[in-house]
Image (cartoon, rainbow, N blue to C red):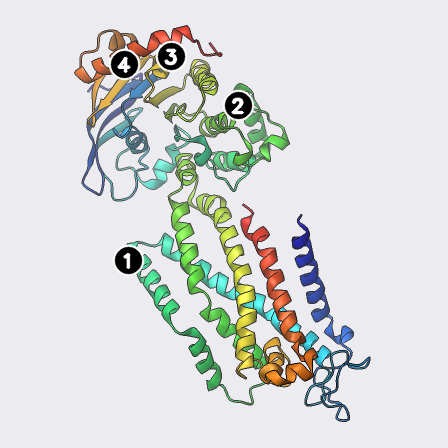
Amino acid sequence: MKLSLRLARGTLLILAGVSLTAEWVAPHHYAEQFREAINEPPSWRFPLGTDGLGRDRLSRLIYGARVSLLLAPLAAGLATSLAGLIGIASSLSGPWLERLLLVSTDLWMTLPWVFLLLTARALLPLDTEPFASVTITFLLLGLLGWPATARIVAARAQQISQATYLLQARACGERRHQLWFRHVWPNLRPVLLAQFWVLVPAFILAEANLSFLGLGVSEPLPSWGSLLRDLENPGALWTQPWIAAPAVVVVIVIACLHGVLPETGGRQ
Amino acid sequence: MQANVAELLAVDLTVEYPSGQRVLNGARFTMSSGEILGLVGESGTGKSTLALAILQLLPPGTRLDGSVRFRGKELVGLSERDLRQIRGKQISLILQSPMTALNPALRIGEQLWQAWIAHGPRDREAFQMRLERLMGALRLPTDRGFLQRYPRELSVGMAQRVLIALATLHQPRLLIADEPTSALDLLTQAETLELLAELNRESGIGILFISHDLNCVAQVCDRVAVLHGGEIVECGPVRDVFERPAHPYVKRLVQMLGARTPVRNRHPSPAT
């Protein structure tokens, strides 16, 4: 295994582990306010300082990782499943239904979905429960993120349906379910897996963007996007460089996810 | 045509692609049990189409007229259910290039198992027993390590023999081999031909040997049919056809073969 791959995997595992055990690892609760220590610089007590409400930045970063690292894969799973179903259905169906499915996929793809996300999210009341806001945000991402993947799955399924080995299997008299589960599916699975791993970082970023605009996960629940909002004022970066920590973590995680990608996608 | 007891296959086919191109135009020939019939013709004359048409495996939209009678039973118009029972069990097909005919994502053992349970019971022991005999005859290893391999880990010659194993698992009456030697080097070509001849000798399996290589055909076939312009222009014992060709196209073919034969004799292939 290449060193970079090991490094990427290790980093992700550690981050996932830390975010899962946030209750024990984080020095403070994410919503706990220390009114006597507002906008503190890093110290032993607050390794990354505190924010404008006197909350520990490191603890919020750790809890925020949980939201992003756990929910992005779930949303990616949802989007990949939808894409798989639609892609497969289009390749199995007759020419008419296939065209209909592909056209609607294209249409779905042409929708300005960032705008749509914003609209959908803005329609929700401002006092939405933090947990509900998380669920809704990622549900929306999952529901909107499938078309490109569906296209890829459809193309691959089409290719497989014309493969010589499938014809050979039919010539051997194999049953329909054998053809499907033993010949088509094993060849389709790597594509879906690769797509899943492409969507995870995309969704992490999408959530960060939405929350940055105040339309993602709602306060006091932290997410990487809402933590990035502190960077809105570039001047602050000079006086308080530690507030850039969430941005650095996001970049590291995305880089690591892309680092793990080829290994997962390239396997036959 | 009178129904012959020994008649294995009687084909009379016209096939038109969705584009309107007529590939086969009343191509007609018969095969008797246990014989090896060579089907020769240039690339693109519809040899592979004929192979697929016999098993009713042509792509949807293709128009097929005529009849395919296998042991007195008409296959044209049969339901997909009934055809499945025949495919792989009574009539087997080996497709052209062994590397693409095997599923790249499946281990060899799994592929053989799938072909086995398509017709046999899910009986691992019976499968193992059949496999051991078959693999032995095909000079393939039967150990777990070999069955655990993926097609890409095999040589082309081995892949070809695995494909033959796949096709003869259920001891069919007829094996259609579509250009089984064209992807192979001379040595593996000779080996494959020998294997097919052996299979034919030992189990009495009829083989429809499709090839554009007249040398191969001359080596293993009892009779030869020449496909040209969508029709069988000549069909008869190999010697008759090659020594006294009647059709001008066949004459030209044989002349070309004649021109090449001395070269072959001066440089005999290592296997002969």
Quadrant (top left/top right/bottom left/bottom right) for the C terminus of chain A: top right
The amino acid marked with disc number 2 is Leu
The verdict on a common chain for dots 2 and 1 is no
Q: Which residue is mark 2?
A: B134
Of the residues shown, which amino acid type is indicated by label 3? Gln
Q: Which residue is mark 4?
A: B256
Q: Nearer the viewer, mark 4 or mark 2?
A: 4
Residue at the spot 40% in from the left edge and 19% down from the top edge: B205
Local packing at callout 2 (Cα closer than 10 Å; few below 14, some 14-19, many 20+) is many
User: Which one is in front, B253 or A40?
Assistant: A40
Same-chain check, marks 4 and 2: yes
Q: For the residues carrying marks 2 and 1, which lies nearer the camera in this image?
A: 1
B124 relative to A32, above or below: above
From this view, report whether residue B243 is shown above or below residue A64: above
Chain for numbered disc 1: A
Q: Position of residue A179 (x, y in %)?
A: 44, 44
B53 vs A30, left or right, is left
What residue does disc 1 label?
A: A96
